Image (cartoon, grey):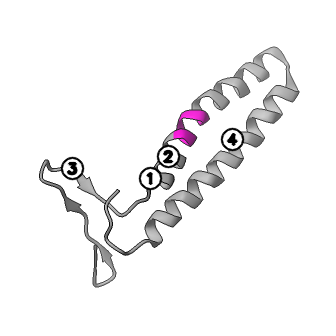
Amino acid sequence: MHDNGKWHEERDSRGHAMVPATPRDVMHIRVGSFLLVFLFAFAVLGLITGASVMTGIAIVLGVLIVIDITLAVRRQKRRSDGEAG
């Protein structure tokens, strides 16, 4: 909930934080961060083995995933209807 332009985080009955989010945005963030771990490993493996194509693909996909996560976080912050996801 917004109070005087500042973010106020509500808690549910069990004490967990409730923030406005859609399941789609949450999945973009969670799956994207999971994939970033593997892409980082592939990029490092490509550097170690000299496979520049694999490194390049991993870096490009990593940048695209970071952009997707950033957009999902921005969509979450723009929502102001108070719906907790």
The residues colored magenta run 31-36
Q: Which residue is found at the position 33% from the left and 82% from the top?
A: 5
- At label 2, counting other C-alpha atoms closer than 10 Å, the crowd grade (few under 14, some 14-19, many 20 or more) is few
Which secondary structure, mark 4? helix
Q: Which residue is found at the position 44% from the left and 67% from the top?
A: 77
Front residue of this view, candidates 33 and 14: 14
Q: Earlier in the sequence, mark 1 or mark 3?
A: 3
Between disc 2 and disc 3, the foreground one is: 2
Q: Which residue is found at the position 82% from the left and 26% from the top?
A: 54
**What's the residue type where badge 3 is placed?**
His
Tell me, yes or no, whether the highlighted magenta stretch contains residue 33: yes
Expressed as whole percent of the image width and height from the top left, the position of residue 15 reads 15, 50
**Residue that carries the numbered disc 4 in the rendered image:** 62
**Residue that carries the numbered disc 2 in the rendered image:** 27
Expressed as whole percent of the image width and height from the top left, the position of residue 80 reads 38, 75
Which secondary structure, mark 1? helix
**Residue that carries the numbered disc 3 in the rendered image:** 16
Q: In the figure, is residue 66 to the left or right of 79?
A: right
Main SS type for the magenta part? helix
Q: In the figure, is residue 28 to the left or right of 63?
A: left
Expressed as whole percent of the image width and height from the top left, the position of residue 11 reads 18, 58
Evaluate if marks 2 and 1 touch, with contact meaning CB atoms under 8 Å apart.
yes
